Amino acid sequence: MIDGVRTKKLKLIPDERGRVMELLRNDDELFIKFGQIYMTSAYPGVVKGWHYHKHQTDTFFCLKGMLKVVLYDDRENSPTKGEVNEFFIGEHNHLAVQIPKEVIHGFKCISETEALVINAPTEVFNYENPDSVRLDPHSSDIPYSWDRKDG
């Protein structure tokens, strides 16, 4: 796994009224600090990426649908420079994925319905000076293809 990336298996607790699932607590091993929490979505087949942050760490949760979350380590002094990680998260695999600053990342909705994603970054979004560097999702500079791998 890419240096600094952490995951946490999420526990879904159902009963006759519905269900509950804790995503992140301030006593969790994954908890660093609170910046904000926001929701984003992706329609089937849509890729959102690539990008990275210079200051913030992201923690992704997929509540509805399924995502393929992909990370690429391009950090100069990282022991895992050049590594790619794939995580399949969502309704069928409740997993939190924590992405360290400067690790390039993106995701693709791989379900037949819209995927709903929660992100709990460590920093608040700065509208005047966003901490987000965007890259072409199909750039040949990153050794990854978003195509489905049949077989």
Image (spheres, helix red, strand yellow):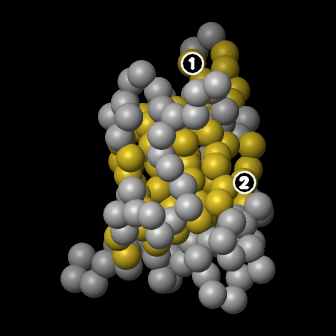
Query: Which of pointers 2 and 1 lies earlier in the amino acid sequence?
Result: 2
Q: Is residue 119 visible?
A: no
- Residue 5, position in %: x, y? 70, 65
Residue lying at the far bottom of the rendered structure = 77
| Residue at 57 percent of width and 72 percent of height | 103
Which image quadrant: the C terminus?
Answer: top right
Which residue in the protein does label 2 denote? 7
- Quadrant of the image occupied by residue 132: bottom left
Given the image, on which type of amino acid does mark 2 rest?
A: Thr
**On the picture, is 79 further left or further right than 110?**
right
Eyeballing the image, is 79 above or below 62?
below
**On the picture, is 34 further left or further right than 3?**
left
- Residue 54, position in %: x, y? 48, 83
Which residue in the protein does label 1 denote? 18
Q: Nearer the viewer, residue 151 or 96?
A: 151
- Residue 46, position in %: x, y? 35, 40
**Residues packed near mark 2 inside 10 Å, few (<14), some (14 to 19) or many (20 plus):** some
| Residue at 64 percent of width and 49 percent of height | 86
Which image quadrant: the N terminus?
Answer: bottom right
| Residue at 44 percent of width and 37 percent of height | 109
**Residues packed near mark 1 inside 10 Å, few (<14), some (14 to 19) or many (20 plus):** few
Q: Please, what secondary structure does the residue beneath circle 2 have? A: strand
The mark closer to the camera, 2 or 1, is 2
